[in-house]
Amino acid sequence: MLQIHNSLTRQKQPFVSLEAGKVRMYVCGMTVYDYCHIGHARVMVVFDVIRRWLRASGYQVQYVRNITDIEDKIIRRARENGEPIQQLTDRFIRFMQEDAAALGVEPPDHEPRATAHVEGMLRLIDELMRKGLAYRAANGDVYYSVRQFPPYGQLSGKSLEDLRAGERVEIDASKQDPLDFVLWKAAKPEEPAWESPWGPGRPGWHIECSAMSEHFLGEHFDIHGGGQDLMFPHHENEIAQSEGAHGHPFVNYWVHNGFVRVDNEKMSKSLGNFFTVRDVLARYDPEVVRFFIVRAHYRSPLNYSDQHLDDARAGLKRLYTTLRDHPVEPQGLLAPKSNADSWSEPYAARFKAAMDDDFNTADAVAVLFDLANEINRTGSGAAQLKGLAGMLGLLQRDPDVFLQAGGGEGEPDAADIERLIEQRAAARKSRQFSEADRIRKELEDRGVLLEDTATGTLWRRK
């Protein structure tokens, strides 16, 4: 039986869905004002794998991953660029979706934008006001009163006293308590605003997810996921909002993936070790990056380095080499998800046991290597290798194509060059000249020269 580590209870629990045979899952998505970084890639890949395994386990999965398209950073970036907010967010939503597709991440069933669900947020805030859980402050903002919600801190495992003493909270004289958080921000000059019972303004960040998850999945659903950094305060605040408004449990299983570190240090722009997905995909095949993410357990820290990416590339080459040398048989265990008996086969049984143990992809990948060794020894079982790997989103390409293209860094192909040129043009348009220069140098290092002309950018190989 599938066991999931529940962040709320801090232990593994048997998974029992609210509705037999169906799973409703919500994952916090991106705030779209910049390119996705490798931490975002991990969130996208991890929950793509979880969704795939739930489906392989016989569930119908309704998967929602939201987009935050109104927030302080978005407003600030649009102002810096001198462009409309929607133009900025539309561009980075497109880039995000391109990155996800490159990594083999299937689109969610619903990808709502916050700005399309303000009406639902207003209804939720109104209910919290009616129940005495929210108040309008002297500055015009509406805040959630954490002292009126006794379970606050249940996800982080800390009391209000612990949180006040140990967390950095915003100091604001308008608040009744430093931990109170904003639900509605009063309008400011030259910022987007919506009408509300408390005057024109815009929603706070936390209320967005409570409203959007309720709209698509109802007031109570199965799984809520996201990065570990969102556990407090974002997910803690979601619980307070939704359970405070409705008076019953919000989510049964909270799932959080671990942090991404770079050479054992926290990834940070200030440290100069910050990598966008596009930075990485310019040097490594997307499936190598996906394999690098999948071969670690989702809750463990993921240490990014060139050496680890090179190791992942070598490992994936080994698996593809097995499939090249032993072409998939016409008959075989391609997808044992529909036949319970097929899971009794030793390698499939081990793979299933690993995935049922809190989506342990690290052990599942180890099974793939053991199976590859068996195939190299006996000459049979390639279809099973491809079928099991497919449940992780791996090994579905022609082996020769991967080994020629993805197995080494080499020169970028024309599609990669055009993608990087488009990325550079967007960086120049938004006045991110250091990023544009970095892309030019990267292409030069890989044997491609650029020439900017009045009609556009031309390229040629050295």
Image: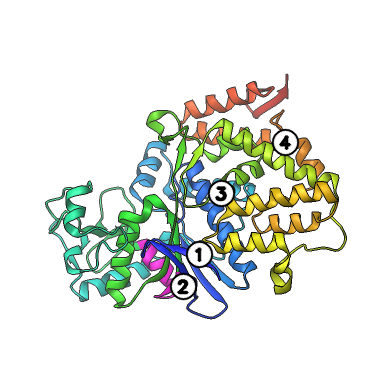
**Quadrant containing the C terminus in the rendered view:** top right
Q: Where on the picture, by quarter, is residue 11?
A: bottom left
- Separation of residues labelled 3 and 1 (CA atoms): 18 Å
Mark whose residue sits in front, 4 or 1: 4
Residue denoted by label 4: 407
C-alpha span from label 4 to label 3? 27 Å
Would you say residue 214 sits in the magenta stretch? yes
Q: Nearer the viewer, mark 4 or mark 2?
A: 4
Task: Tell me if residue 170 can be seen.
Answer: no
Q: CB under 8 Å between callouts 4 and 2?
A: no
Residue at numbered disc 1: 64
| Upstream in sequence: badge 2 or badge 3 | 3
* Picture disc at residue 217: 2
Magenta part, dominant SS? helix
Between discs 4 and 2, the one toward the N terminus: 2
Boundaries of the magenta span = 208-222
Marks 3 and 1 in Cβ contact (< 8 Å): no
Say what amino acid the circle numbered 3 marks.
Answer: Arg
Task: Say which label, 3 or 1, has the lower sequence index.
Answer: 1
Secondary structure found at label 4: loop
Amino acid, disc 1? Val
Quadrant location of the N terminus in the rendered image: bottom right
Q: For mark 3, what is the residue?
A: 94
Q: Are marks 1 and 2 in contact (CB under 8 Å)?
A: yes
Mark 2 burial class by Cα count in 10 Å: few <14, some 14-19, many 20+: some
Residue 331 lies, in percent from the top left, at 86, 63
Q: CA distance from mark 4 to mark 1?
A: 34 Å
Residue drawn at 20 percent across, 58 percent down: 180
Q: Do the CB atoms of the residues marked 2 and 3 lie less than 8 Å apart? A: no
